[in-house]
Amino acid sequence: MFLAVSLAVPTGACSSSDSTGASGGEVVDGGESVVVDAAAADANDGGTDAQIDGDASFVPGTVVFSDDFSDGNLADDWDVLTVANGTTAEIDMGAFHVKTKVIAAQEADFAHLRKTVPGAPSRVRLSFSATFPSTTFTKGSMAIATVDVSNNHFFTLWLRDTDSSAPAASLEEISLSGTKRNVLGSPPPTNVATKIVVDIDLAAGTASVTWDATKALDAAAIQKGTTEDPTIRVGAVYDYGPQDAFEAHFDDVVLEYY
């Protein structure tokens, strides 16, 4: 059971917890299982949020999408909001707030936003601010962001990954060559707003992750390749049980193409 709100017509790669539908409506939190499509809003809301048009080209090194959540409206910026039944996702104090529920083994939960931005950059840089009451996990798995650079090349930022022997914070890469696990030097700090950056350079074949000035992953080798209309997700993207309730605030999401 989940609730997925398509805030515009979605394109590009799609995770197993994403869904789209065909009727209009509005979402507050995870209640009944329902799928809703809302009409696409203006590409620029006139505030600090910005995104390129579907037909627009990008200038390398520029911001192609951003949202600081200050307008209190998700529909004018994001394609899809996906919320599992019994889980909450809302704008709270000018940030995107997610709160998941306790889940048992073999169960899953999620509450996240998704955005696809047209383009074929050689480098994709996702950044956002996040505040976590805790990043210490003793069970289950939790991912807070994904970057799909094409329909067959994906990156997932885990606070605790699915490795069966020694789960840890990692950046996971899935490509046609297989799956690669890049273990991070540490999880992000708790109880403080932290700028998180996932920097993927397909031309150089490297990926980096930083928490503010701390390099959690420094130019790890990845599969080189091309991109096509990258898709980002932010929030509690994957939450696999057994797992305690999880809470986080996300803000100042920025996507840059190079």
Image: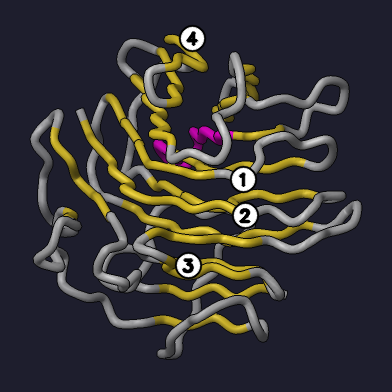
Residue picked out by circle 2: 247
Residue 13 in sight in this render: no
- Assign a secondary structure to mark 3: strand
In front: label 2 or label 1: 1
CB under 8 Å between discs 1 and 3: no
- The residue at the point 47 percent across, 50 percent down is 234
Residue picked out by circle 1: 133
Of the numbered discs 3 and 2, the one sitting upstream in the chain is 3
- The residue at the point 61 percent across, 19 percent down is 186
* Residue 216, image x, y percentages: 51, 17
Please identify the quadrant where the N terminus is shown.
bottom right
* Mark 4 residue crowding within 10 angstroms, few (<14) / some (14–19) / many (20+): some
* Mark 2 residue crowding within 10 angstroms, few (<14) / some (14–19) / many (20+): some
Residue picked out by circle 4: 221
Q: Amino acid at mark 1?
A: Pro
- Which of 45 and 187 lies nearest the eye of the viewer? 187
Q: Amino acid at mark 4?
A: Ala
Spatial separation of the CA atoms under disc 1 and disc 3 = 23 Å
Spatial separation of the CA atoms under disc 4 and disc 1 = 31 Å
* Residue 208, image x, y percentages: 43, 18
